[in-house]
Image (tube, grey):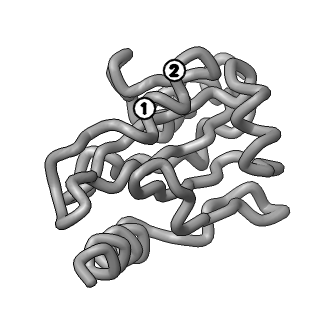
């Protein structure tokens, strides 16, 4: 048993994709965070990518968050944000929602297998679409 645990430690360390404290938000600052970052696009706002995360499924978190371009990333522990979870109808973790100017634009939800059905490329394409659409 001990050998198995030692073999799994590197997997879980990589899977969690440590996110610095400043990227974590909760119900107390959620709405403020999704409406901030006025610095990009004709309407003056940068897309905000929010990952709803759960400790029980940290192996399936979005590990490439630091490679996103032209967007700001935040992670929310669903245990710390029951209001946001309810408001945005988050039923599975991980769920990624892309906001622009505080408005929900795109959603990627984990399936029954608890895996996110999108990769970095698909999420980046959605960010690019949101940025392009806001220029009209």
Rendering coords of residue 55 (x, y %): 67, 27
Quadrant into which the C terminus falls = bottom left
Which of the image's four quarters has the N terminus? top right
Q: In which quadrant of the rendered view does residue 115 lie?
A: bottom right
Rendering quarter of residue 78 = top right
Tag count: 2
**Picture coordinates of residue 11, whole percent (x, y):** 49, 38
Q: Residue at x 54, y 68 (%)?
A: 106
Q: Nearer the viewer, residue 69 or 34?
A: 34
Which residue is drawn at the image coordinates 75% and 38% (left, top)?
Answer: 85
Q: Which mark is residue 67?
A: none
- Could you say which disc has been placed on residue 29 in the image? 2
Rendered view: 82 above or below 96: above
**Discs 2, 1 touching: Cβ within 8 Å:** yes
Residue located beneath label 1 in the image: 33
Mark 1 neighbour density, 10 Å: few (under 14) some (14–19) many (20 or more) = some
**Position in image of residue 29 (x %, y %):** 51, 20
14 or 87: nearer the eye?
A: 87
| Residue sitting at x 20%, y 59% | 69
| For residue 74, above or below residue 77 | below
From the top left corner, tell me how far across and down residue 101 is, in percent.
40, 52
Between the residue at mark 2 and the residue at mark 1, the CA separation in whole angstroms equals: 6 Å
Of residues 94 and 131, the one nearer the viewer is 131
Q: Is residue 97 left or right of residue 101?
A: right
Q: Nearer the viewer, residue 121 or 99?
A: 99
Please tell me which residue is depicted at 36% across the width and 72% down the height of the picture: 130
Could you tell whether 5 is left or right of 21 in the image? right
Dot 2 falls on a residue whose secondary structure is loop
Where 116 sits versus 93, above or below?
below
Q: Quadrant of residue 31?
A: top right
User: Label 2: few (<14), some or many (≥20) within 10 Å?
Assistant: few
Which SS class for mark 1? helix
């Amino acid at each position: 048993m001990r050998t198995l645990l030692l073999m799994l430690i590197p997997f879980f360390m990589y899977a969690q994709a440590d996110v610095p404290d400043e990227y974590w938000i909760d119900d107390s600052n959620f709405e403020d965070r999704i409406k901030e970052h006025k610095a990009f696009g004709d309407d003056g706002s940068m897309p905000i990518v929010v990952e709803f995360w759960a400790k029980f499924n940290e192996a399936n978190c979005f590990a490439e968050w630091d490679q996103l371009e032209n967007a700001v990333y935040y992670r929310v522990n669903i245990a710390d944000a029951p209001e946001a979870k309810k408001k945005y109808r988050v039923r599975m973790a991980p769920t990624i929602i892309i906001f622009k100017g505080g408005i929900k634009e795109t959603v990627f939800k984990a399936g029954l297998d608890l895996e996110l059905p999108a990769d970095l490329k698909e999420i980046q394409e959605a960010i690019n679409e949101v940025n392009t659409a806001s220029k009209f």
